[in-house]
Image (cartoon, rainbow, N blue to C red):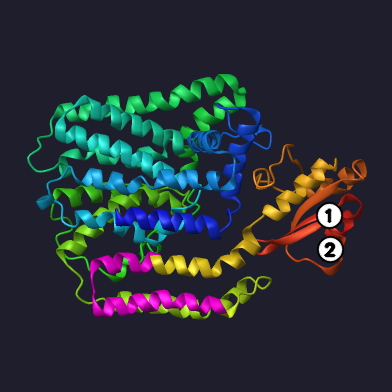
Amino acid sequence: MLTLIIAVVAVVIRVNYLPLMPIDETRYLSVAWEMWQNNSFLVPHLNGEPYPDKPPLLFWLIQSAWALFGTSDVVARLTIPAVGLLTFPLLVAIQREWPEQQAPGMRWAPPVLLAMTMWFVYMPLSMFDILQTTCLLIATLGWVRYVHRAERRWLVLAGFGLGLALLAKGPVVLIYWLPLTLSTRFWRPDGVTIGARHYWAILPATLLGAAVVLAWAIPAAITGSPEYAQAIFWGQSAGRVTNAFAHARPWYWYLPLLPLLTLPWPTVWLWRRPLASGSLERFALWGCLPPLVILSLVSGKQVHYLMPALPFLAIWVAGQIERHPPRRTWLYRLLLLVLAGLMLALPEIALRFYPLAPLPNAVRLTALVPLALIVGLSLHPRRVIMTLAWPLSLLALLIGLSPALARYYDVTPFAREIGYQQQQGVPVAYVGDYANQFRFLGRLTQDMTVIDSDEVIAWSADHPQGALIEVVDTLSPAQRAGALFSQPYRGSFLVLMPSARHGLLDR
């Protein structure tokens, strides 16, 4: 319960202090907003075009929250994190299927998960990975209970959860689902006999999951264009697999990142044989190691692809900590001390990366949080302090850095200016690749015209009273003076320039 309360507080604070992060978060909320505007339930749209890249569950949840609570930014931003918070009680429910004597560290897995750097960073974001993980844990809970209790209702829950995971992010969830279910005999709770019926049960559960996603995909394919139908049936399944072995990144790309993504735990536990002393730890390893191997073999690597493996890794780490309680926490304290040093230098660091958003000296006070926790760990090296020290310190760091992040990543002012220009009848065009990052934040009602740089002269001639949006690396005094609006943007600058002055955009 304490873990869930802290997670809720962290999500609310993050949503309050930090902006929607372009390009992903702003794009996904804009897709949901466009569906809401057009009463489009089946086919997501991005800037007026069908959007086949992602299934619709995330967009449906946001629209449902809008229907219940209104279309505010806060409602939109809290919806997916609120669903993601279910991972903690789901993790507890899964572990309860093992007798406590077989499950060392059972009560520590949720706080271990909360403290993992990658989980803590992604938890408040409106993205697909936390949602997919929550749905996968629903499917996993159903399967584990079916294995333990042999009741069909749990098999239905497993299939339904799998279907939700497919609706969340597509067939990639099978990388986690199939190795875990096919390896049931290796991690079954003691006293449970695994027979052929369990392996045959994988098929109906998987088919039920497929039926759930097809209940959307078939009507969507009929409603959308033939190109959209091909994209959601081929591009989201066989097409992704076909393109997955292009070796864009080396197979070992994840390995050096894992210690960073799972901080602080590499500083706390020291693995000692056996790798897994009980069936719960074997279950945890089957939940995280095979997906890691599979994802390492394909080229399309992003850190957030590992998200569904983290709850299983948290179970294993909790077991290691329980069996080998850390008596010396000097390495963990050193990590917190390094973080405190960074926070003391936050104004100088921010000035280096965000020169247009200087931070006041008062942000140095955020270093008191990790320093106080270092003292706490020195006096009482308890696991509750260890599990809370890192996320609380990261939260303090993000709060201190939030003014700079808002200056460089919050595109709300720019989006509202676009909306104002459109309301005045000014035609607006975006030069380059547009990710629909303005539609929701500006509550835009018109699709954005998108042109290439070699079309600027012709478009400006056709729309002499129009305005052009472009991202430029540097902003000259002439560009700043001639622009209708400009602001820093992810290390560059967003510029809204009158068509008559399009020559100022030339670099």
Residue 307, image x, y percentages = 39, 50
Which of the 4 quarters of the picture holds residue 196?
top left
Foreground of the two, 391 or 220: 391
Instruction: Answer whether labels 1 and 2 touch (C-beta < 8 Å).
Output: yes
The amino acid type, in three-letter code, at marker 2 is Gln
Q: Is residue 312 magenta?
A: no
From this viewpoint, which residue is outermost toward the left? 191
The quadrant where residue 39 appears:
top right
Kind of element beneath mark 2: helix
Residue 253 visible in the snapshot? no
Residue range (magenta)? 362-391
Residue 386 percent coordinates (x, y) = 29, 68
**What's the distance in space between the residues labelled 1 and 2, CA to CA?**
8 Å
Instruction: Give how far across and how far down residue 3 sits, in percent.
Output: 32, 56
Residue 479: which disc? 2
Q: Is residue 409 visible?
A: yes
User: Does the stretch in magenta take in 368?
Assistant: yes
Name the residue located 45 percent from the left edge and 22 percent from the top edge: 215
Q: Point out the residue furthest to the front here.
A: 69
Identify the residue at image location x=42%, y=43%.
Answer: 83
Question: What number of labels is visible?
Answer: 2
Asked whether 494 or 108 is in front, the reply is 108
x and y percent of residue 27 in the render? 60, 45
Give the SS element for disc 1: strand
Tell me which residue sits at (60%, 67%) in the image: 403
- Residue on which the image places disc 1: 497
Q: Is residue 189 left or right of residue 94?
A: left
